[in-house]
Image: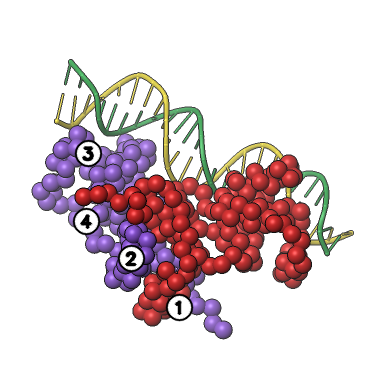
Chain colours: A purple, B red, C yellow, D green
Amino acid sequence: MAETAHESWHEELRARGYRVTPQRQLVLEAVAELVHGTPEEICSRVQQTARGVNISTVYRTLELLEKVGMVTHTHLGHGAPTYHLATEADHSHLVCRGCGEVTEVQPESVASLVDRLRADLGFETDVRHLTVFGRCRACQTPG
Amino acid sequence: MAETAHESWHEELRARGYRVTPQRQLVLEAVAELVHGTPEEICSRVQQTARGVNISTVYRTLELLEKVGMVTHTHLGHGAPTYHLATEADHSHLVCRGCGEVTEVQPESVASLVDRLRADLGFETDVRHLTVFGRCRACQTPG
DNA sequence: GTTGGTGCAAAATGTTTGCACGGGG
DNA sequence: CCCCGTGCAAACATTTTGCACCAAC
């Protein structure tokens, strides 16, 4: 985790006229490590390394990183959204109302929906943002 | 609209040990009339008839009506959820990120997804809560 | 008459904004 | 050295909660 790799995203930001700052690096690392982190959680994570970082900076940074296509978000429940690295493989989410469990499903599971909406309506689905609520097998109300 | 019908839902509530109050009637009527109302909008609507009704009563009432299965909610955007009558026909929603348009789609459009999740995972989808984000035909970025 | 429901105000939660300072380029 | 990005505090938006009073039954 948090390897320097090539830091090619530095150029990505610079090319768009944005600056590379320690806060932005830390937020991006936290998004990667938490996998499904809320802004609050990301902020806490970042503050383990750099205490001074403010929650409003986290919000502004997430907005920026999403704008340049480095992260995405979805809504897994009632409250705060959760953030992903955009480089993670595409997937959608299932959320069980019974036990609260969150399951990642591969694009093939939702491909029929995506195809149908594209064919019928010309609608291009954002599968990364797609969250399906319902009840998992274990939580079916019997009878 | 707001016909008295048989008010059979009165018994529905009573049978569960809840009371029938003017506020609950008004909130239910407002949900029906607004079709996609947020709690705030529902409250405003209710207050056109009865000024004193408080927003917290609206929240508590919506929670109750949802618990007894008379209304459902979904999330059409960033902010507040929107409420429907449960007696309305099942449908899901598409939200276009380009123009913001909200489209209702019939269950058949999402049936393949529902079937797939049930067959593969035993997951029972709540189609009424399902909202798909993406871009409508008119808002595809060309090229 | 009981007890659940309501109005009100305050707190809790989640997010945005204005502003002055400091660091990145 | 310029000006974008940050910290901070306050505003904002949405939802929840504590409590005394009132109304449904």
Residue A138 circle label? 1
Q: Are there few (<14), some (14-19), or many (20+) residues within 10 Å of tag 4?
A: few
Q: Are there few (<14), some (14-19), or many (20+) residues within 10 Å of tag 2?
A: few
- Amino acid type shown at disc 4: Thr
Mark toward the start of the polypeptide (3 vs 2): 3
- Amino acid type shown at disc 3: Pro
Q: Could you tell whether C22 is left or right of B88 in the image?
A: left
Q: Which residue is mark 2?
A: A119
4 and 2 marks on the same chain: yes
Asked whether residue A141 appears in the rendered view, the answer is yes
2 and 1 marks on the same chain: yes
The answer for which chain carries disc 4 is: A
Q: Which residue is mark 4?
A: A87
Mark toward the start of the polypeptide (4 vs 2): 4
Residue B143: image x %, image y %?
A: 21, 50
* Point 33% across, 49% down: residue: B139
Mark 3–mark 1 Cα distance, whole angstroms, equals 44 Å
Labels 4 & 2 near each other (Cβ < 8 A)? no
Q: Are there few (<14), some (14-19), or many (20+) residues within 10 Å of tag 1?
A: few
Mark toward the start of the polypeptide (3 vs 1): 3
Mark 3–mark 2 Cα distance, whole angstroms, equals 45 Å
Q: Which residue is mark 3?
A: A22
